[in-house]
């Protein structure tokens, strides 16, 4: 596996490298379940399966987590927040030490 922290000084480039590496690993995990009928060579027509960008009433407006496992979420006007790699509601707890969501005792 390529070390993204080695020889890459730009943080943005390191993040992109880390995400690309994670994608490659996850794609490799899917290799045993590859089905040729879902490829162009197997006759798959992408028009039958159109992916739509999520918009709707609550589209994502923030990201949570660390690279390469960041994900988008909707803050719902401050009703939801990110704690390390978990989305939570401030009314239900606080983001405490080590990213645990609970009611902290300071």
Image (spheres, rainbow, N blue to C red):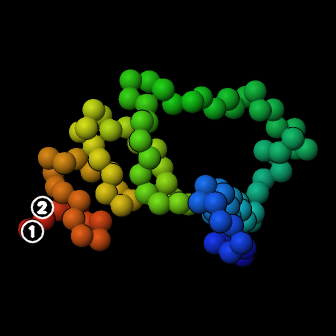
Q: At numbered mark 1, what does the secondary structure look like: helix, strand or loop?
A: loop
Q: Residue furthest left?
A: 105
Asked whether residue 21 is in view, the answer is yes
Left or right: 32 as drawn, with respect to 51 = right
Work out whether 101 lies above or below 48.
Answer: below
Asked whether residue 26 is in view, the answer is no
Which quadrant holds residue 62? top left
Which numbered mark, 2 or 1, is in the foreground of this view?
1
Which quadrant holds residue 100? bottom left
Q: At numbered mark 2, what does the secondary structure look like: helix, strand or loop?
A: loop
Query: Residue 29's spot in the image, x, y percent?
Result: 68, 66
Q: Gap in Å between the C-alphas at discs 2 and 1?
A: 10 Å
Q: Which residue is disc 2 drawn over?
A: 103
At a point 69% along the width and 67% down the height, the residue shown is 8
Left or right: 41 as drawn, with respect to 88 = right
Q: Which residue is disc 1 drawn over?
A: 106
Which quadrant holds residue 25? bottom right
Left or right: 61 as drawn, with respect to 23 = left
């Amino acid at each position: 596996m390529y070390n993204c922290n080695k020889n890459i000084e730009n943080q943005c480039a390191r993040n992109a490298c880390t995400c690309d590496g994670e994608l490659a690993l996850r794609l490799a995990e899917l290799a045993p379940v590859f089905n040729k009928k879902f490829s162009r060579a197997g006759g798959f027509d992408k028009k039958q399966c159109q992916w739509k960008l999520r918009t709707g009433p609550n589209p994502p407006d923030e990201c949570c987590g660390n690279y390469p496992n960041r994900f988008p979420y909707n803050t719902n006007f401050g009703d939801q927040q990110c704690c390390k790699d978990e989305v939570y509601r401030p009314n239900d707890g606080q983001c405490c030490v080590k990213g645990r969501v609970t009611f902290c005792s300071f």
